[in-house]
Image (spheres, rainbow, N blue to C red):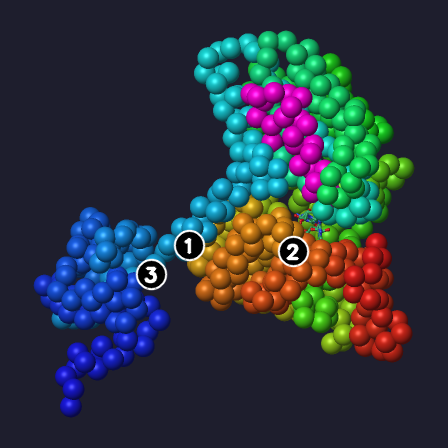
Amino acid sequence: MPDPTEIEIRLIDRLPEAVLVLNAERRVMAANRMAKRLLGGDPAGQSLVELVPNADAVPDIWNVTGEATAQFEAHALSKDGRAFPAYVSVGAALPYFLVTLRDLTDQAAIERQLVERTLRDQLTGLPARALFLEQVEQALLRRRVHGSTSEIAVVCLDIDRFKVINDSLGYHAGDELLIAVARRLEEALGAGYALARLGGDEFGFLVECNRKAEAAILADAALDAFKNGFTLGASLPGRQLAVGASVGLAFADPGIAPRAPTLVSNADVALHRAKTGGGARIEIFEPARHGDALGLLEMELALREAVDKNEFEIVYQPIVDLDGGRMRGVEALLRWNRAGKFAVPPGVFIPIAEQSGLIMPIGRHVLAQACLQMARWRRDYGAAAPDYVAVNVSARQLAREDMPALVASTLEAAGLDPCHLELELTESAVVDNPAAARKLLDAVVSLGASLAIDDFGTGQSSLSLLPSLPFAKLKIDRSFVGEMDVDPNSFEIVRVIIGLAKALGLRMVAEGIERDSQSKLLLDLGCVLGQGFLYYRPLPAREIERLCAAIKGPPSAAIEPGKVVA
Ligand code: C2E
Ligand code: MG
Ligand code: MG
């Protein structure tokens, strides 16, 4: 009969985690196979402090009793002296102590990559939006601290008709153009303006100057940089592509000490006006003199009436099995078709709705419509209908305590079984106030609906929070997916995100799949669900119905995956 310790050791040897058994003197009396591998040898006889130098600084580490464990993150040392980040848990198994070690090296690498990724745009090498906002914030702070009267302006620039170029010449040409524009703007502006890519085809820069005219001159220089057209060597050899841009400019009024996000969104409003005015022009956001606040106010007022005027449309993008393309769920995406005006993209009106609080009624509208629509599809098409509808919920909505009650009453009014509803939240919605978010999310999950974390990897990283929140799914942001087949860095990020999702037992959906090669790589990595133009664009409800009918009935009504319908 082997002695008890041997049995225990044989048992712990099978555990996938590194486990150490410490005797009453707190020295290692046994280590399992994983621990020996992690520590580069057998640590028998060593004290915990020799293995995890900071362990003694953890209060009450040796006073754990019963089921309780002391858990902390620290650096552990392997036999060869290499320090690695580890998650350490100490529990009592009297007369012994049981210590588990989890190597966080991978996780630390993911966090570093994600931080780097949010700070810098991989395609152009320019700072990304988060870093730009930080630079603007610093400039505003410097001015406040020094009591200076200098002008601070944010200039946003967006390529005119970029979508047409992208759609007609292909995404490689689009990428090539973005890089060329970045270089051209760097040349035109020179150093010192914090030039950044703010997302999509939008660039921004920061001007600190003595007179407003200087900022306007620079905005003009940026527009001028487009005069000579662009040659895209790889995509359009030997041909000159005429490309224009629109520019929006906003000054930070020293009197009202604005914050960086407000300043950038003011510049965005001006930019939007420049675009709807026909493009190839500069618009300045200057509330006092030009009544531009009116532009914002007017948009806000119009938004307020949009529900009543029936100007909102909800389109649905199928989420499919990457293998075979069968529709599994749909994501509800809001469209605002302003009567007599251009369609306003969600990237412009959602932030305005969030700032003004209008996201509350609008969000309720989307949730109610999406649930009603889904209930109808389930009723009319049964198993041929999508399994679930995913609805985007913004941070502002989650901050309301009545969120779970709203979800419950909406589901009930629509007669929809909660298992057919998924809510998508971004990381920032939970990072801002994790404790409050957890309470509300738990309540939503207990209704029977499920939760997905949207745009994963682009916001403030919530890696350390993620395991304790009731998310069932993680959506890999399209900025990573979009480049994963051409950029090894993006591929690596997608790979680690998928690894992370698997380790946490989360399902995943890859967003923004545009090419076969991306879909194949995702499948190889073990991601089986996705959405993107390769399969379907966001479609009006009636097109989803055609799809359901095709699944249910004769195949002649089928819409081929990949066919662009809307
Ligand atoms: P999201 O939730 O990440 O939605 C996915 C976005 O990716 C959609 O943009 C969709 O049209 C786009 N997309 C899908 N496949 C592809 C692809 O293959 N390539 C590319 N380039 N894009 C693809 P959309 O509809 O413009 O919406 C933008 C964002 O606006 C959404 O991002 C979401 O954050 C927000 N939004 C949309 N509707 C609502 C809503 O009802 N409520 C809230 N709070 N936010 C919404
Ligand atoms: Mg979404
Ligand atoms: Mg997303």
Q: Give whichever of discs 3 and 1 has the lower sequence position.
A: 3
**At 70% from the left edge and 14% from the top edge, which residue is drawn?**
217
Kind of residue sitting beneath label 2: Glu
The segment highlighted magenta reads 173-196
Kindly identify the amino acid type of the residue bearing the numbered disc 1. Gln
Q: Quadrant of residue 102?
A: bottom left
In-image side of 48 versus 517 (left or right): left
Helix, strand or loop: magenta stretch: helix
| Residue pictured at 65% horizontal, 30% vertical | 183
Res. 147 in view: yes
**Location of mark 1 (residue):** 107
Q: On the image, which quarter does residue 299 sit in?
A: top right
Mark 2 highlights which residue? 511
Can residue 285 be seen by looking at this rendering? Answer: no
Q: Secondary structure at mark 2?
A: loop
* Residue where numbered disc 3 is placed: 102
